[in-house]
Amino acid sequence: MSTLRIILFQQPLGERVKRTQIEEMSSFEPHFVCFPEYYFANRRLGNHGQTPHNQKRQIRYLALLSKRLHTTIIGGTMPELANDAMYNTCFVFHNGNLLGYYRKRNLFFPEVGKITPGNEWKVFSAHGITFGVLICADVFYEESFLAMQQRGARIIFVPTFSLRKVETIEEKIKRDNDIFVRGASLAQAIVVKVCGVPSPYKDFIHARSLIAAPNGVLYRVRPDEEEKAMIIKQEVEIP
C-alpha cells in the first residue's frame, strides 16, 4: 500500500499559475499535480489554436513548474502541432524532465475536424508507481480503462472539460458511479478527474472534479463548489 499526495488544480482555463498558488502547492509536497483539459491553451489562440512559439513556451513552462514543485505534473492538455496535424495532448513532466505525452483518442464533437485523434494508450512511471492518462471523452469507452489495466496503471489521471449541465444531485451521483467508479473497477485502479471552472474565457463549463476507486467515490467537489476555483489537496492510498 502506497500513500500518494495528489493535487487537483481546479482553476479557470488559460491562466498562468500564480506564485501564491505555487507556494500553496509546494507546502503540501505533492507526488502528483493534475491540471484540467485545455488549461494550457492560449486564450488569444483559443482551445483549438496553436503556434510553434507558444507551444515551446508552454512546454518549457511545464518543465520549470514540475522542477519548482519537485513533483510529477500531469499537464492538463494543450493543442499540439505535430506531423502536419493538431492534437489535444497531455504532457507529463517529473522534476523538470519529460516523461512523455498522451494524445486524446476520443474526441468531443467541437474538436472533430480540428483535432486529430491519437492512436496510442500510454502509461508512465514515477515515485515507484505506474500511472496512466486519459482525456475527457476517453472515459466513455470501456476499452480506455481496460487498456490502462492491461498496462498496469495503478492510478489514472483524467484532465476534463466538463460542460455545465442541469442535473439533480442524484443524477450527478449516478453518472459518477456509472462512468468513474465503473471505470476504476474495470481498470482496477484509482481514477482522478480534474476539471476547469467557469470564467469569462469559458463560462459554460463547471468543475466536477473527483477521485474514484473500484468500490466508490473517494472524493468529489460539493455541488456548490462546481464553479469555485480550488487547489484540492488529497492523500490517496494505492494498493
Image (cartoon, grey):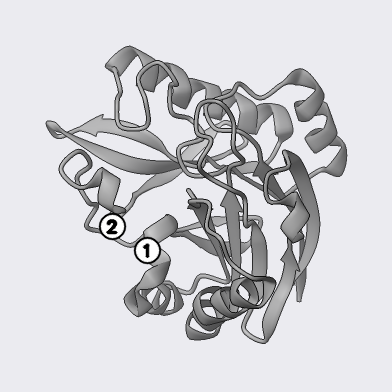
Mark 1 element type:
helix
* Pick the front one: 199 or 49: 199
Circles 1 and 2, Cβ within 8 Å, touching? The answer is yes
- Horizontal and vertical percent position of residue 71: 68, 41
Three-letter residue code for mark 1: Asp
Q: Is residue 210 visible?
A: yes
Q: Which mark is residue 138?
A: 1
The residue labelled by disc 2 is: 105
Q: Residue at x 62, y 84 (%)?
A: 214
Q: Residue at x 77, y 54 (%)?
A: 224
* Pick the front one: 71 or 197: 197
Three-letter residue code for mark 2: Arg
- Horizontal and vertical percent position of residue 188: 55, 82
**Could you tell me how far apart the alpha carbons at marks 1 and 2 are, in whole angstroms?**
7 Å
* Quarter in which the C terminus is drawn: bottom right
Q: Is residue 4 above or below residue 205?
A: below
User: Local crowd at mark 1 within 10 Å, few (<14), some, or many (≥20)?
Assistant: some
Q: Residue at x 50, y 76 (%)?
A: 179
Q: Is residue 144 above or below residue 77?
A: below
